[in-house]
Amino acid sequence: MPDLHRPYNGKSLTIIGLGNELLSDDGAGIRVVRELKKRLGADAITFHELSVGGLQLLDYIVGHDHCIIVDAVVTGTHPPGTMLRFVQTADSEPVRLSSSHQVDLTQVVSLAQLFGADIPRRLVVYGIEAGDITTFRDGCTEEVSRAIPRLVEAICSDVEEESLACGTPAGAWQLIPDVVPE
């Protein structure tokens, strides 16, 4: 296991949870990041809980070697609670990727590259397929609530193994297999 009190694999890592906790499943990203902070708590990892998206993310990702973004996603092709991963590398063509926060990696990464910003070499988006992101409710649906600890475990595994999904090809959503049985 790596020494989590030093930078991740010798590099800086920022973990960003996106969402609005008052909109049911939309708060999943923030809830995951709170658990990650308890589990990883490394001095060299920066944690953020944000309700922003798009170009506003630039302020939080610039200057880090690696970045993880955790959010509720609505693909419409998976049942609620399905865990997904998307990898964007600095040298791969930015792929259009939107969530309810309008996290559009095409705009963010392309603009950052245009301005010569110091963007992460690897940006990994972890998502939980949401069932409801419009109902005002403090708490996630049952399916998403059950997925949160499983996604925390998957992300911890990637961070602790210092892999950040290195075997995952860039530019496509991938299903994350359960590391912990329900």
Image (spheres, grey):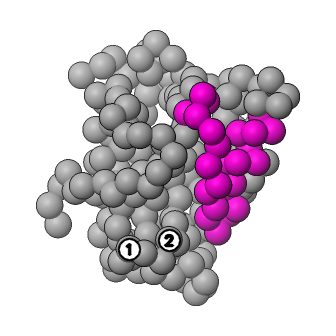
Relative to 58, is 114 above or below? Answer: above
Q: Quadrant of the N terminus?
A: top left
Lateral position of residue 169 relative to residue 51, left or right: left
Which residue is identified by label 1? 78
The location of residue 145, given as percent across then percent down, is 36, 71
Q: Are marks 2 and 1 in contact (CB under 8 Å)?
A: yes
The location of residue 70, given as percent across then percent down, is 51, 52
Q: Residue 3, can we see it?
A: yes
The location of residue 16, given as percent across then percent down, is 57, 45
Q: Amino acid at mark 2?
A: Thr
Q: Amino acid at mark 1?
A: His
Residue 181, image quadrant: bottom left
Q: Residue 126, can we see it?
A: no
Residue 54 belongs to magenta span:
no
Relative to 144, is 71 above or below? Answer: above
Count neighbours of disc 1 (C-alpha within 10 A) and say few if under 14, some if 14 to 19, many if 20 or more. some
Residue at x 52%, y 66% (from the top left corner):
73
Lateral position of residue 152 relative to residue 25, left or right: left
Q: Secondary structure at mark 1?
A: loop
Label 2, label 1: how far apart the Cα atoms are? 7 Å
The location of residue 2, given as percent across then percent down, is 30, 19
Residue situated in front as seen by the camera: 67 or 40? 67
Magenta stretch, main secondary structure, is loop
The region drawn magenta spans 89-112
Residue 90 belongs to magenta span:
yes
Query: Which mark identifies residue 75?
Result: 2
Task: State the residue lying farthest toward the front.
Answer: 93
Residue situated in front as seen by the camera: 161 or 169? 169
Residue at x 44%, y 21% (from the top left corner):
8
Residue at x 58%, y 34% (from the top left corner):
92
Q: Quadrant of the C terminus?
A: bottom left
Task: State the residue lying farthest toward the right.
Answer: 115
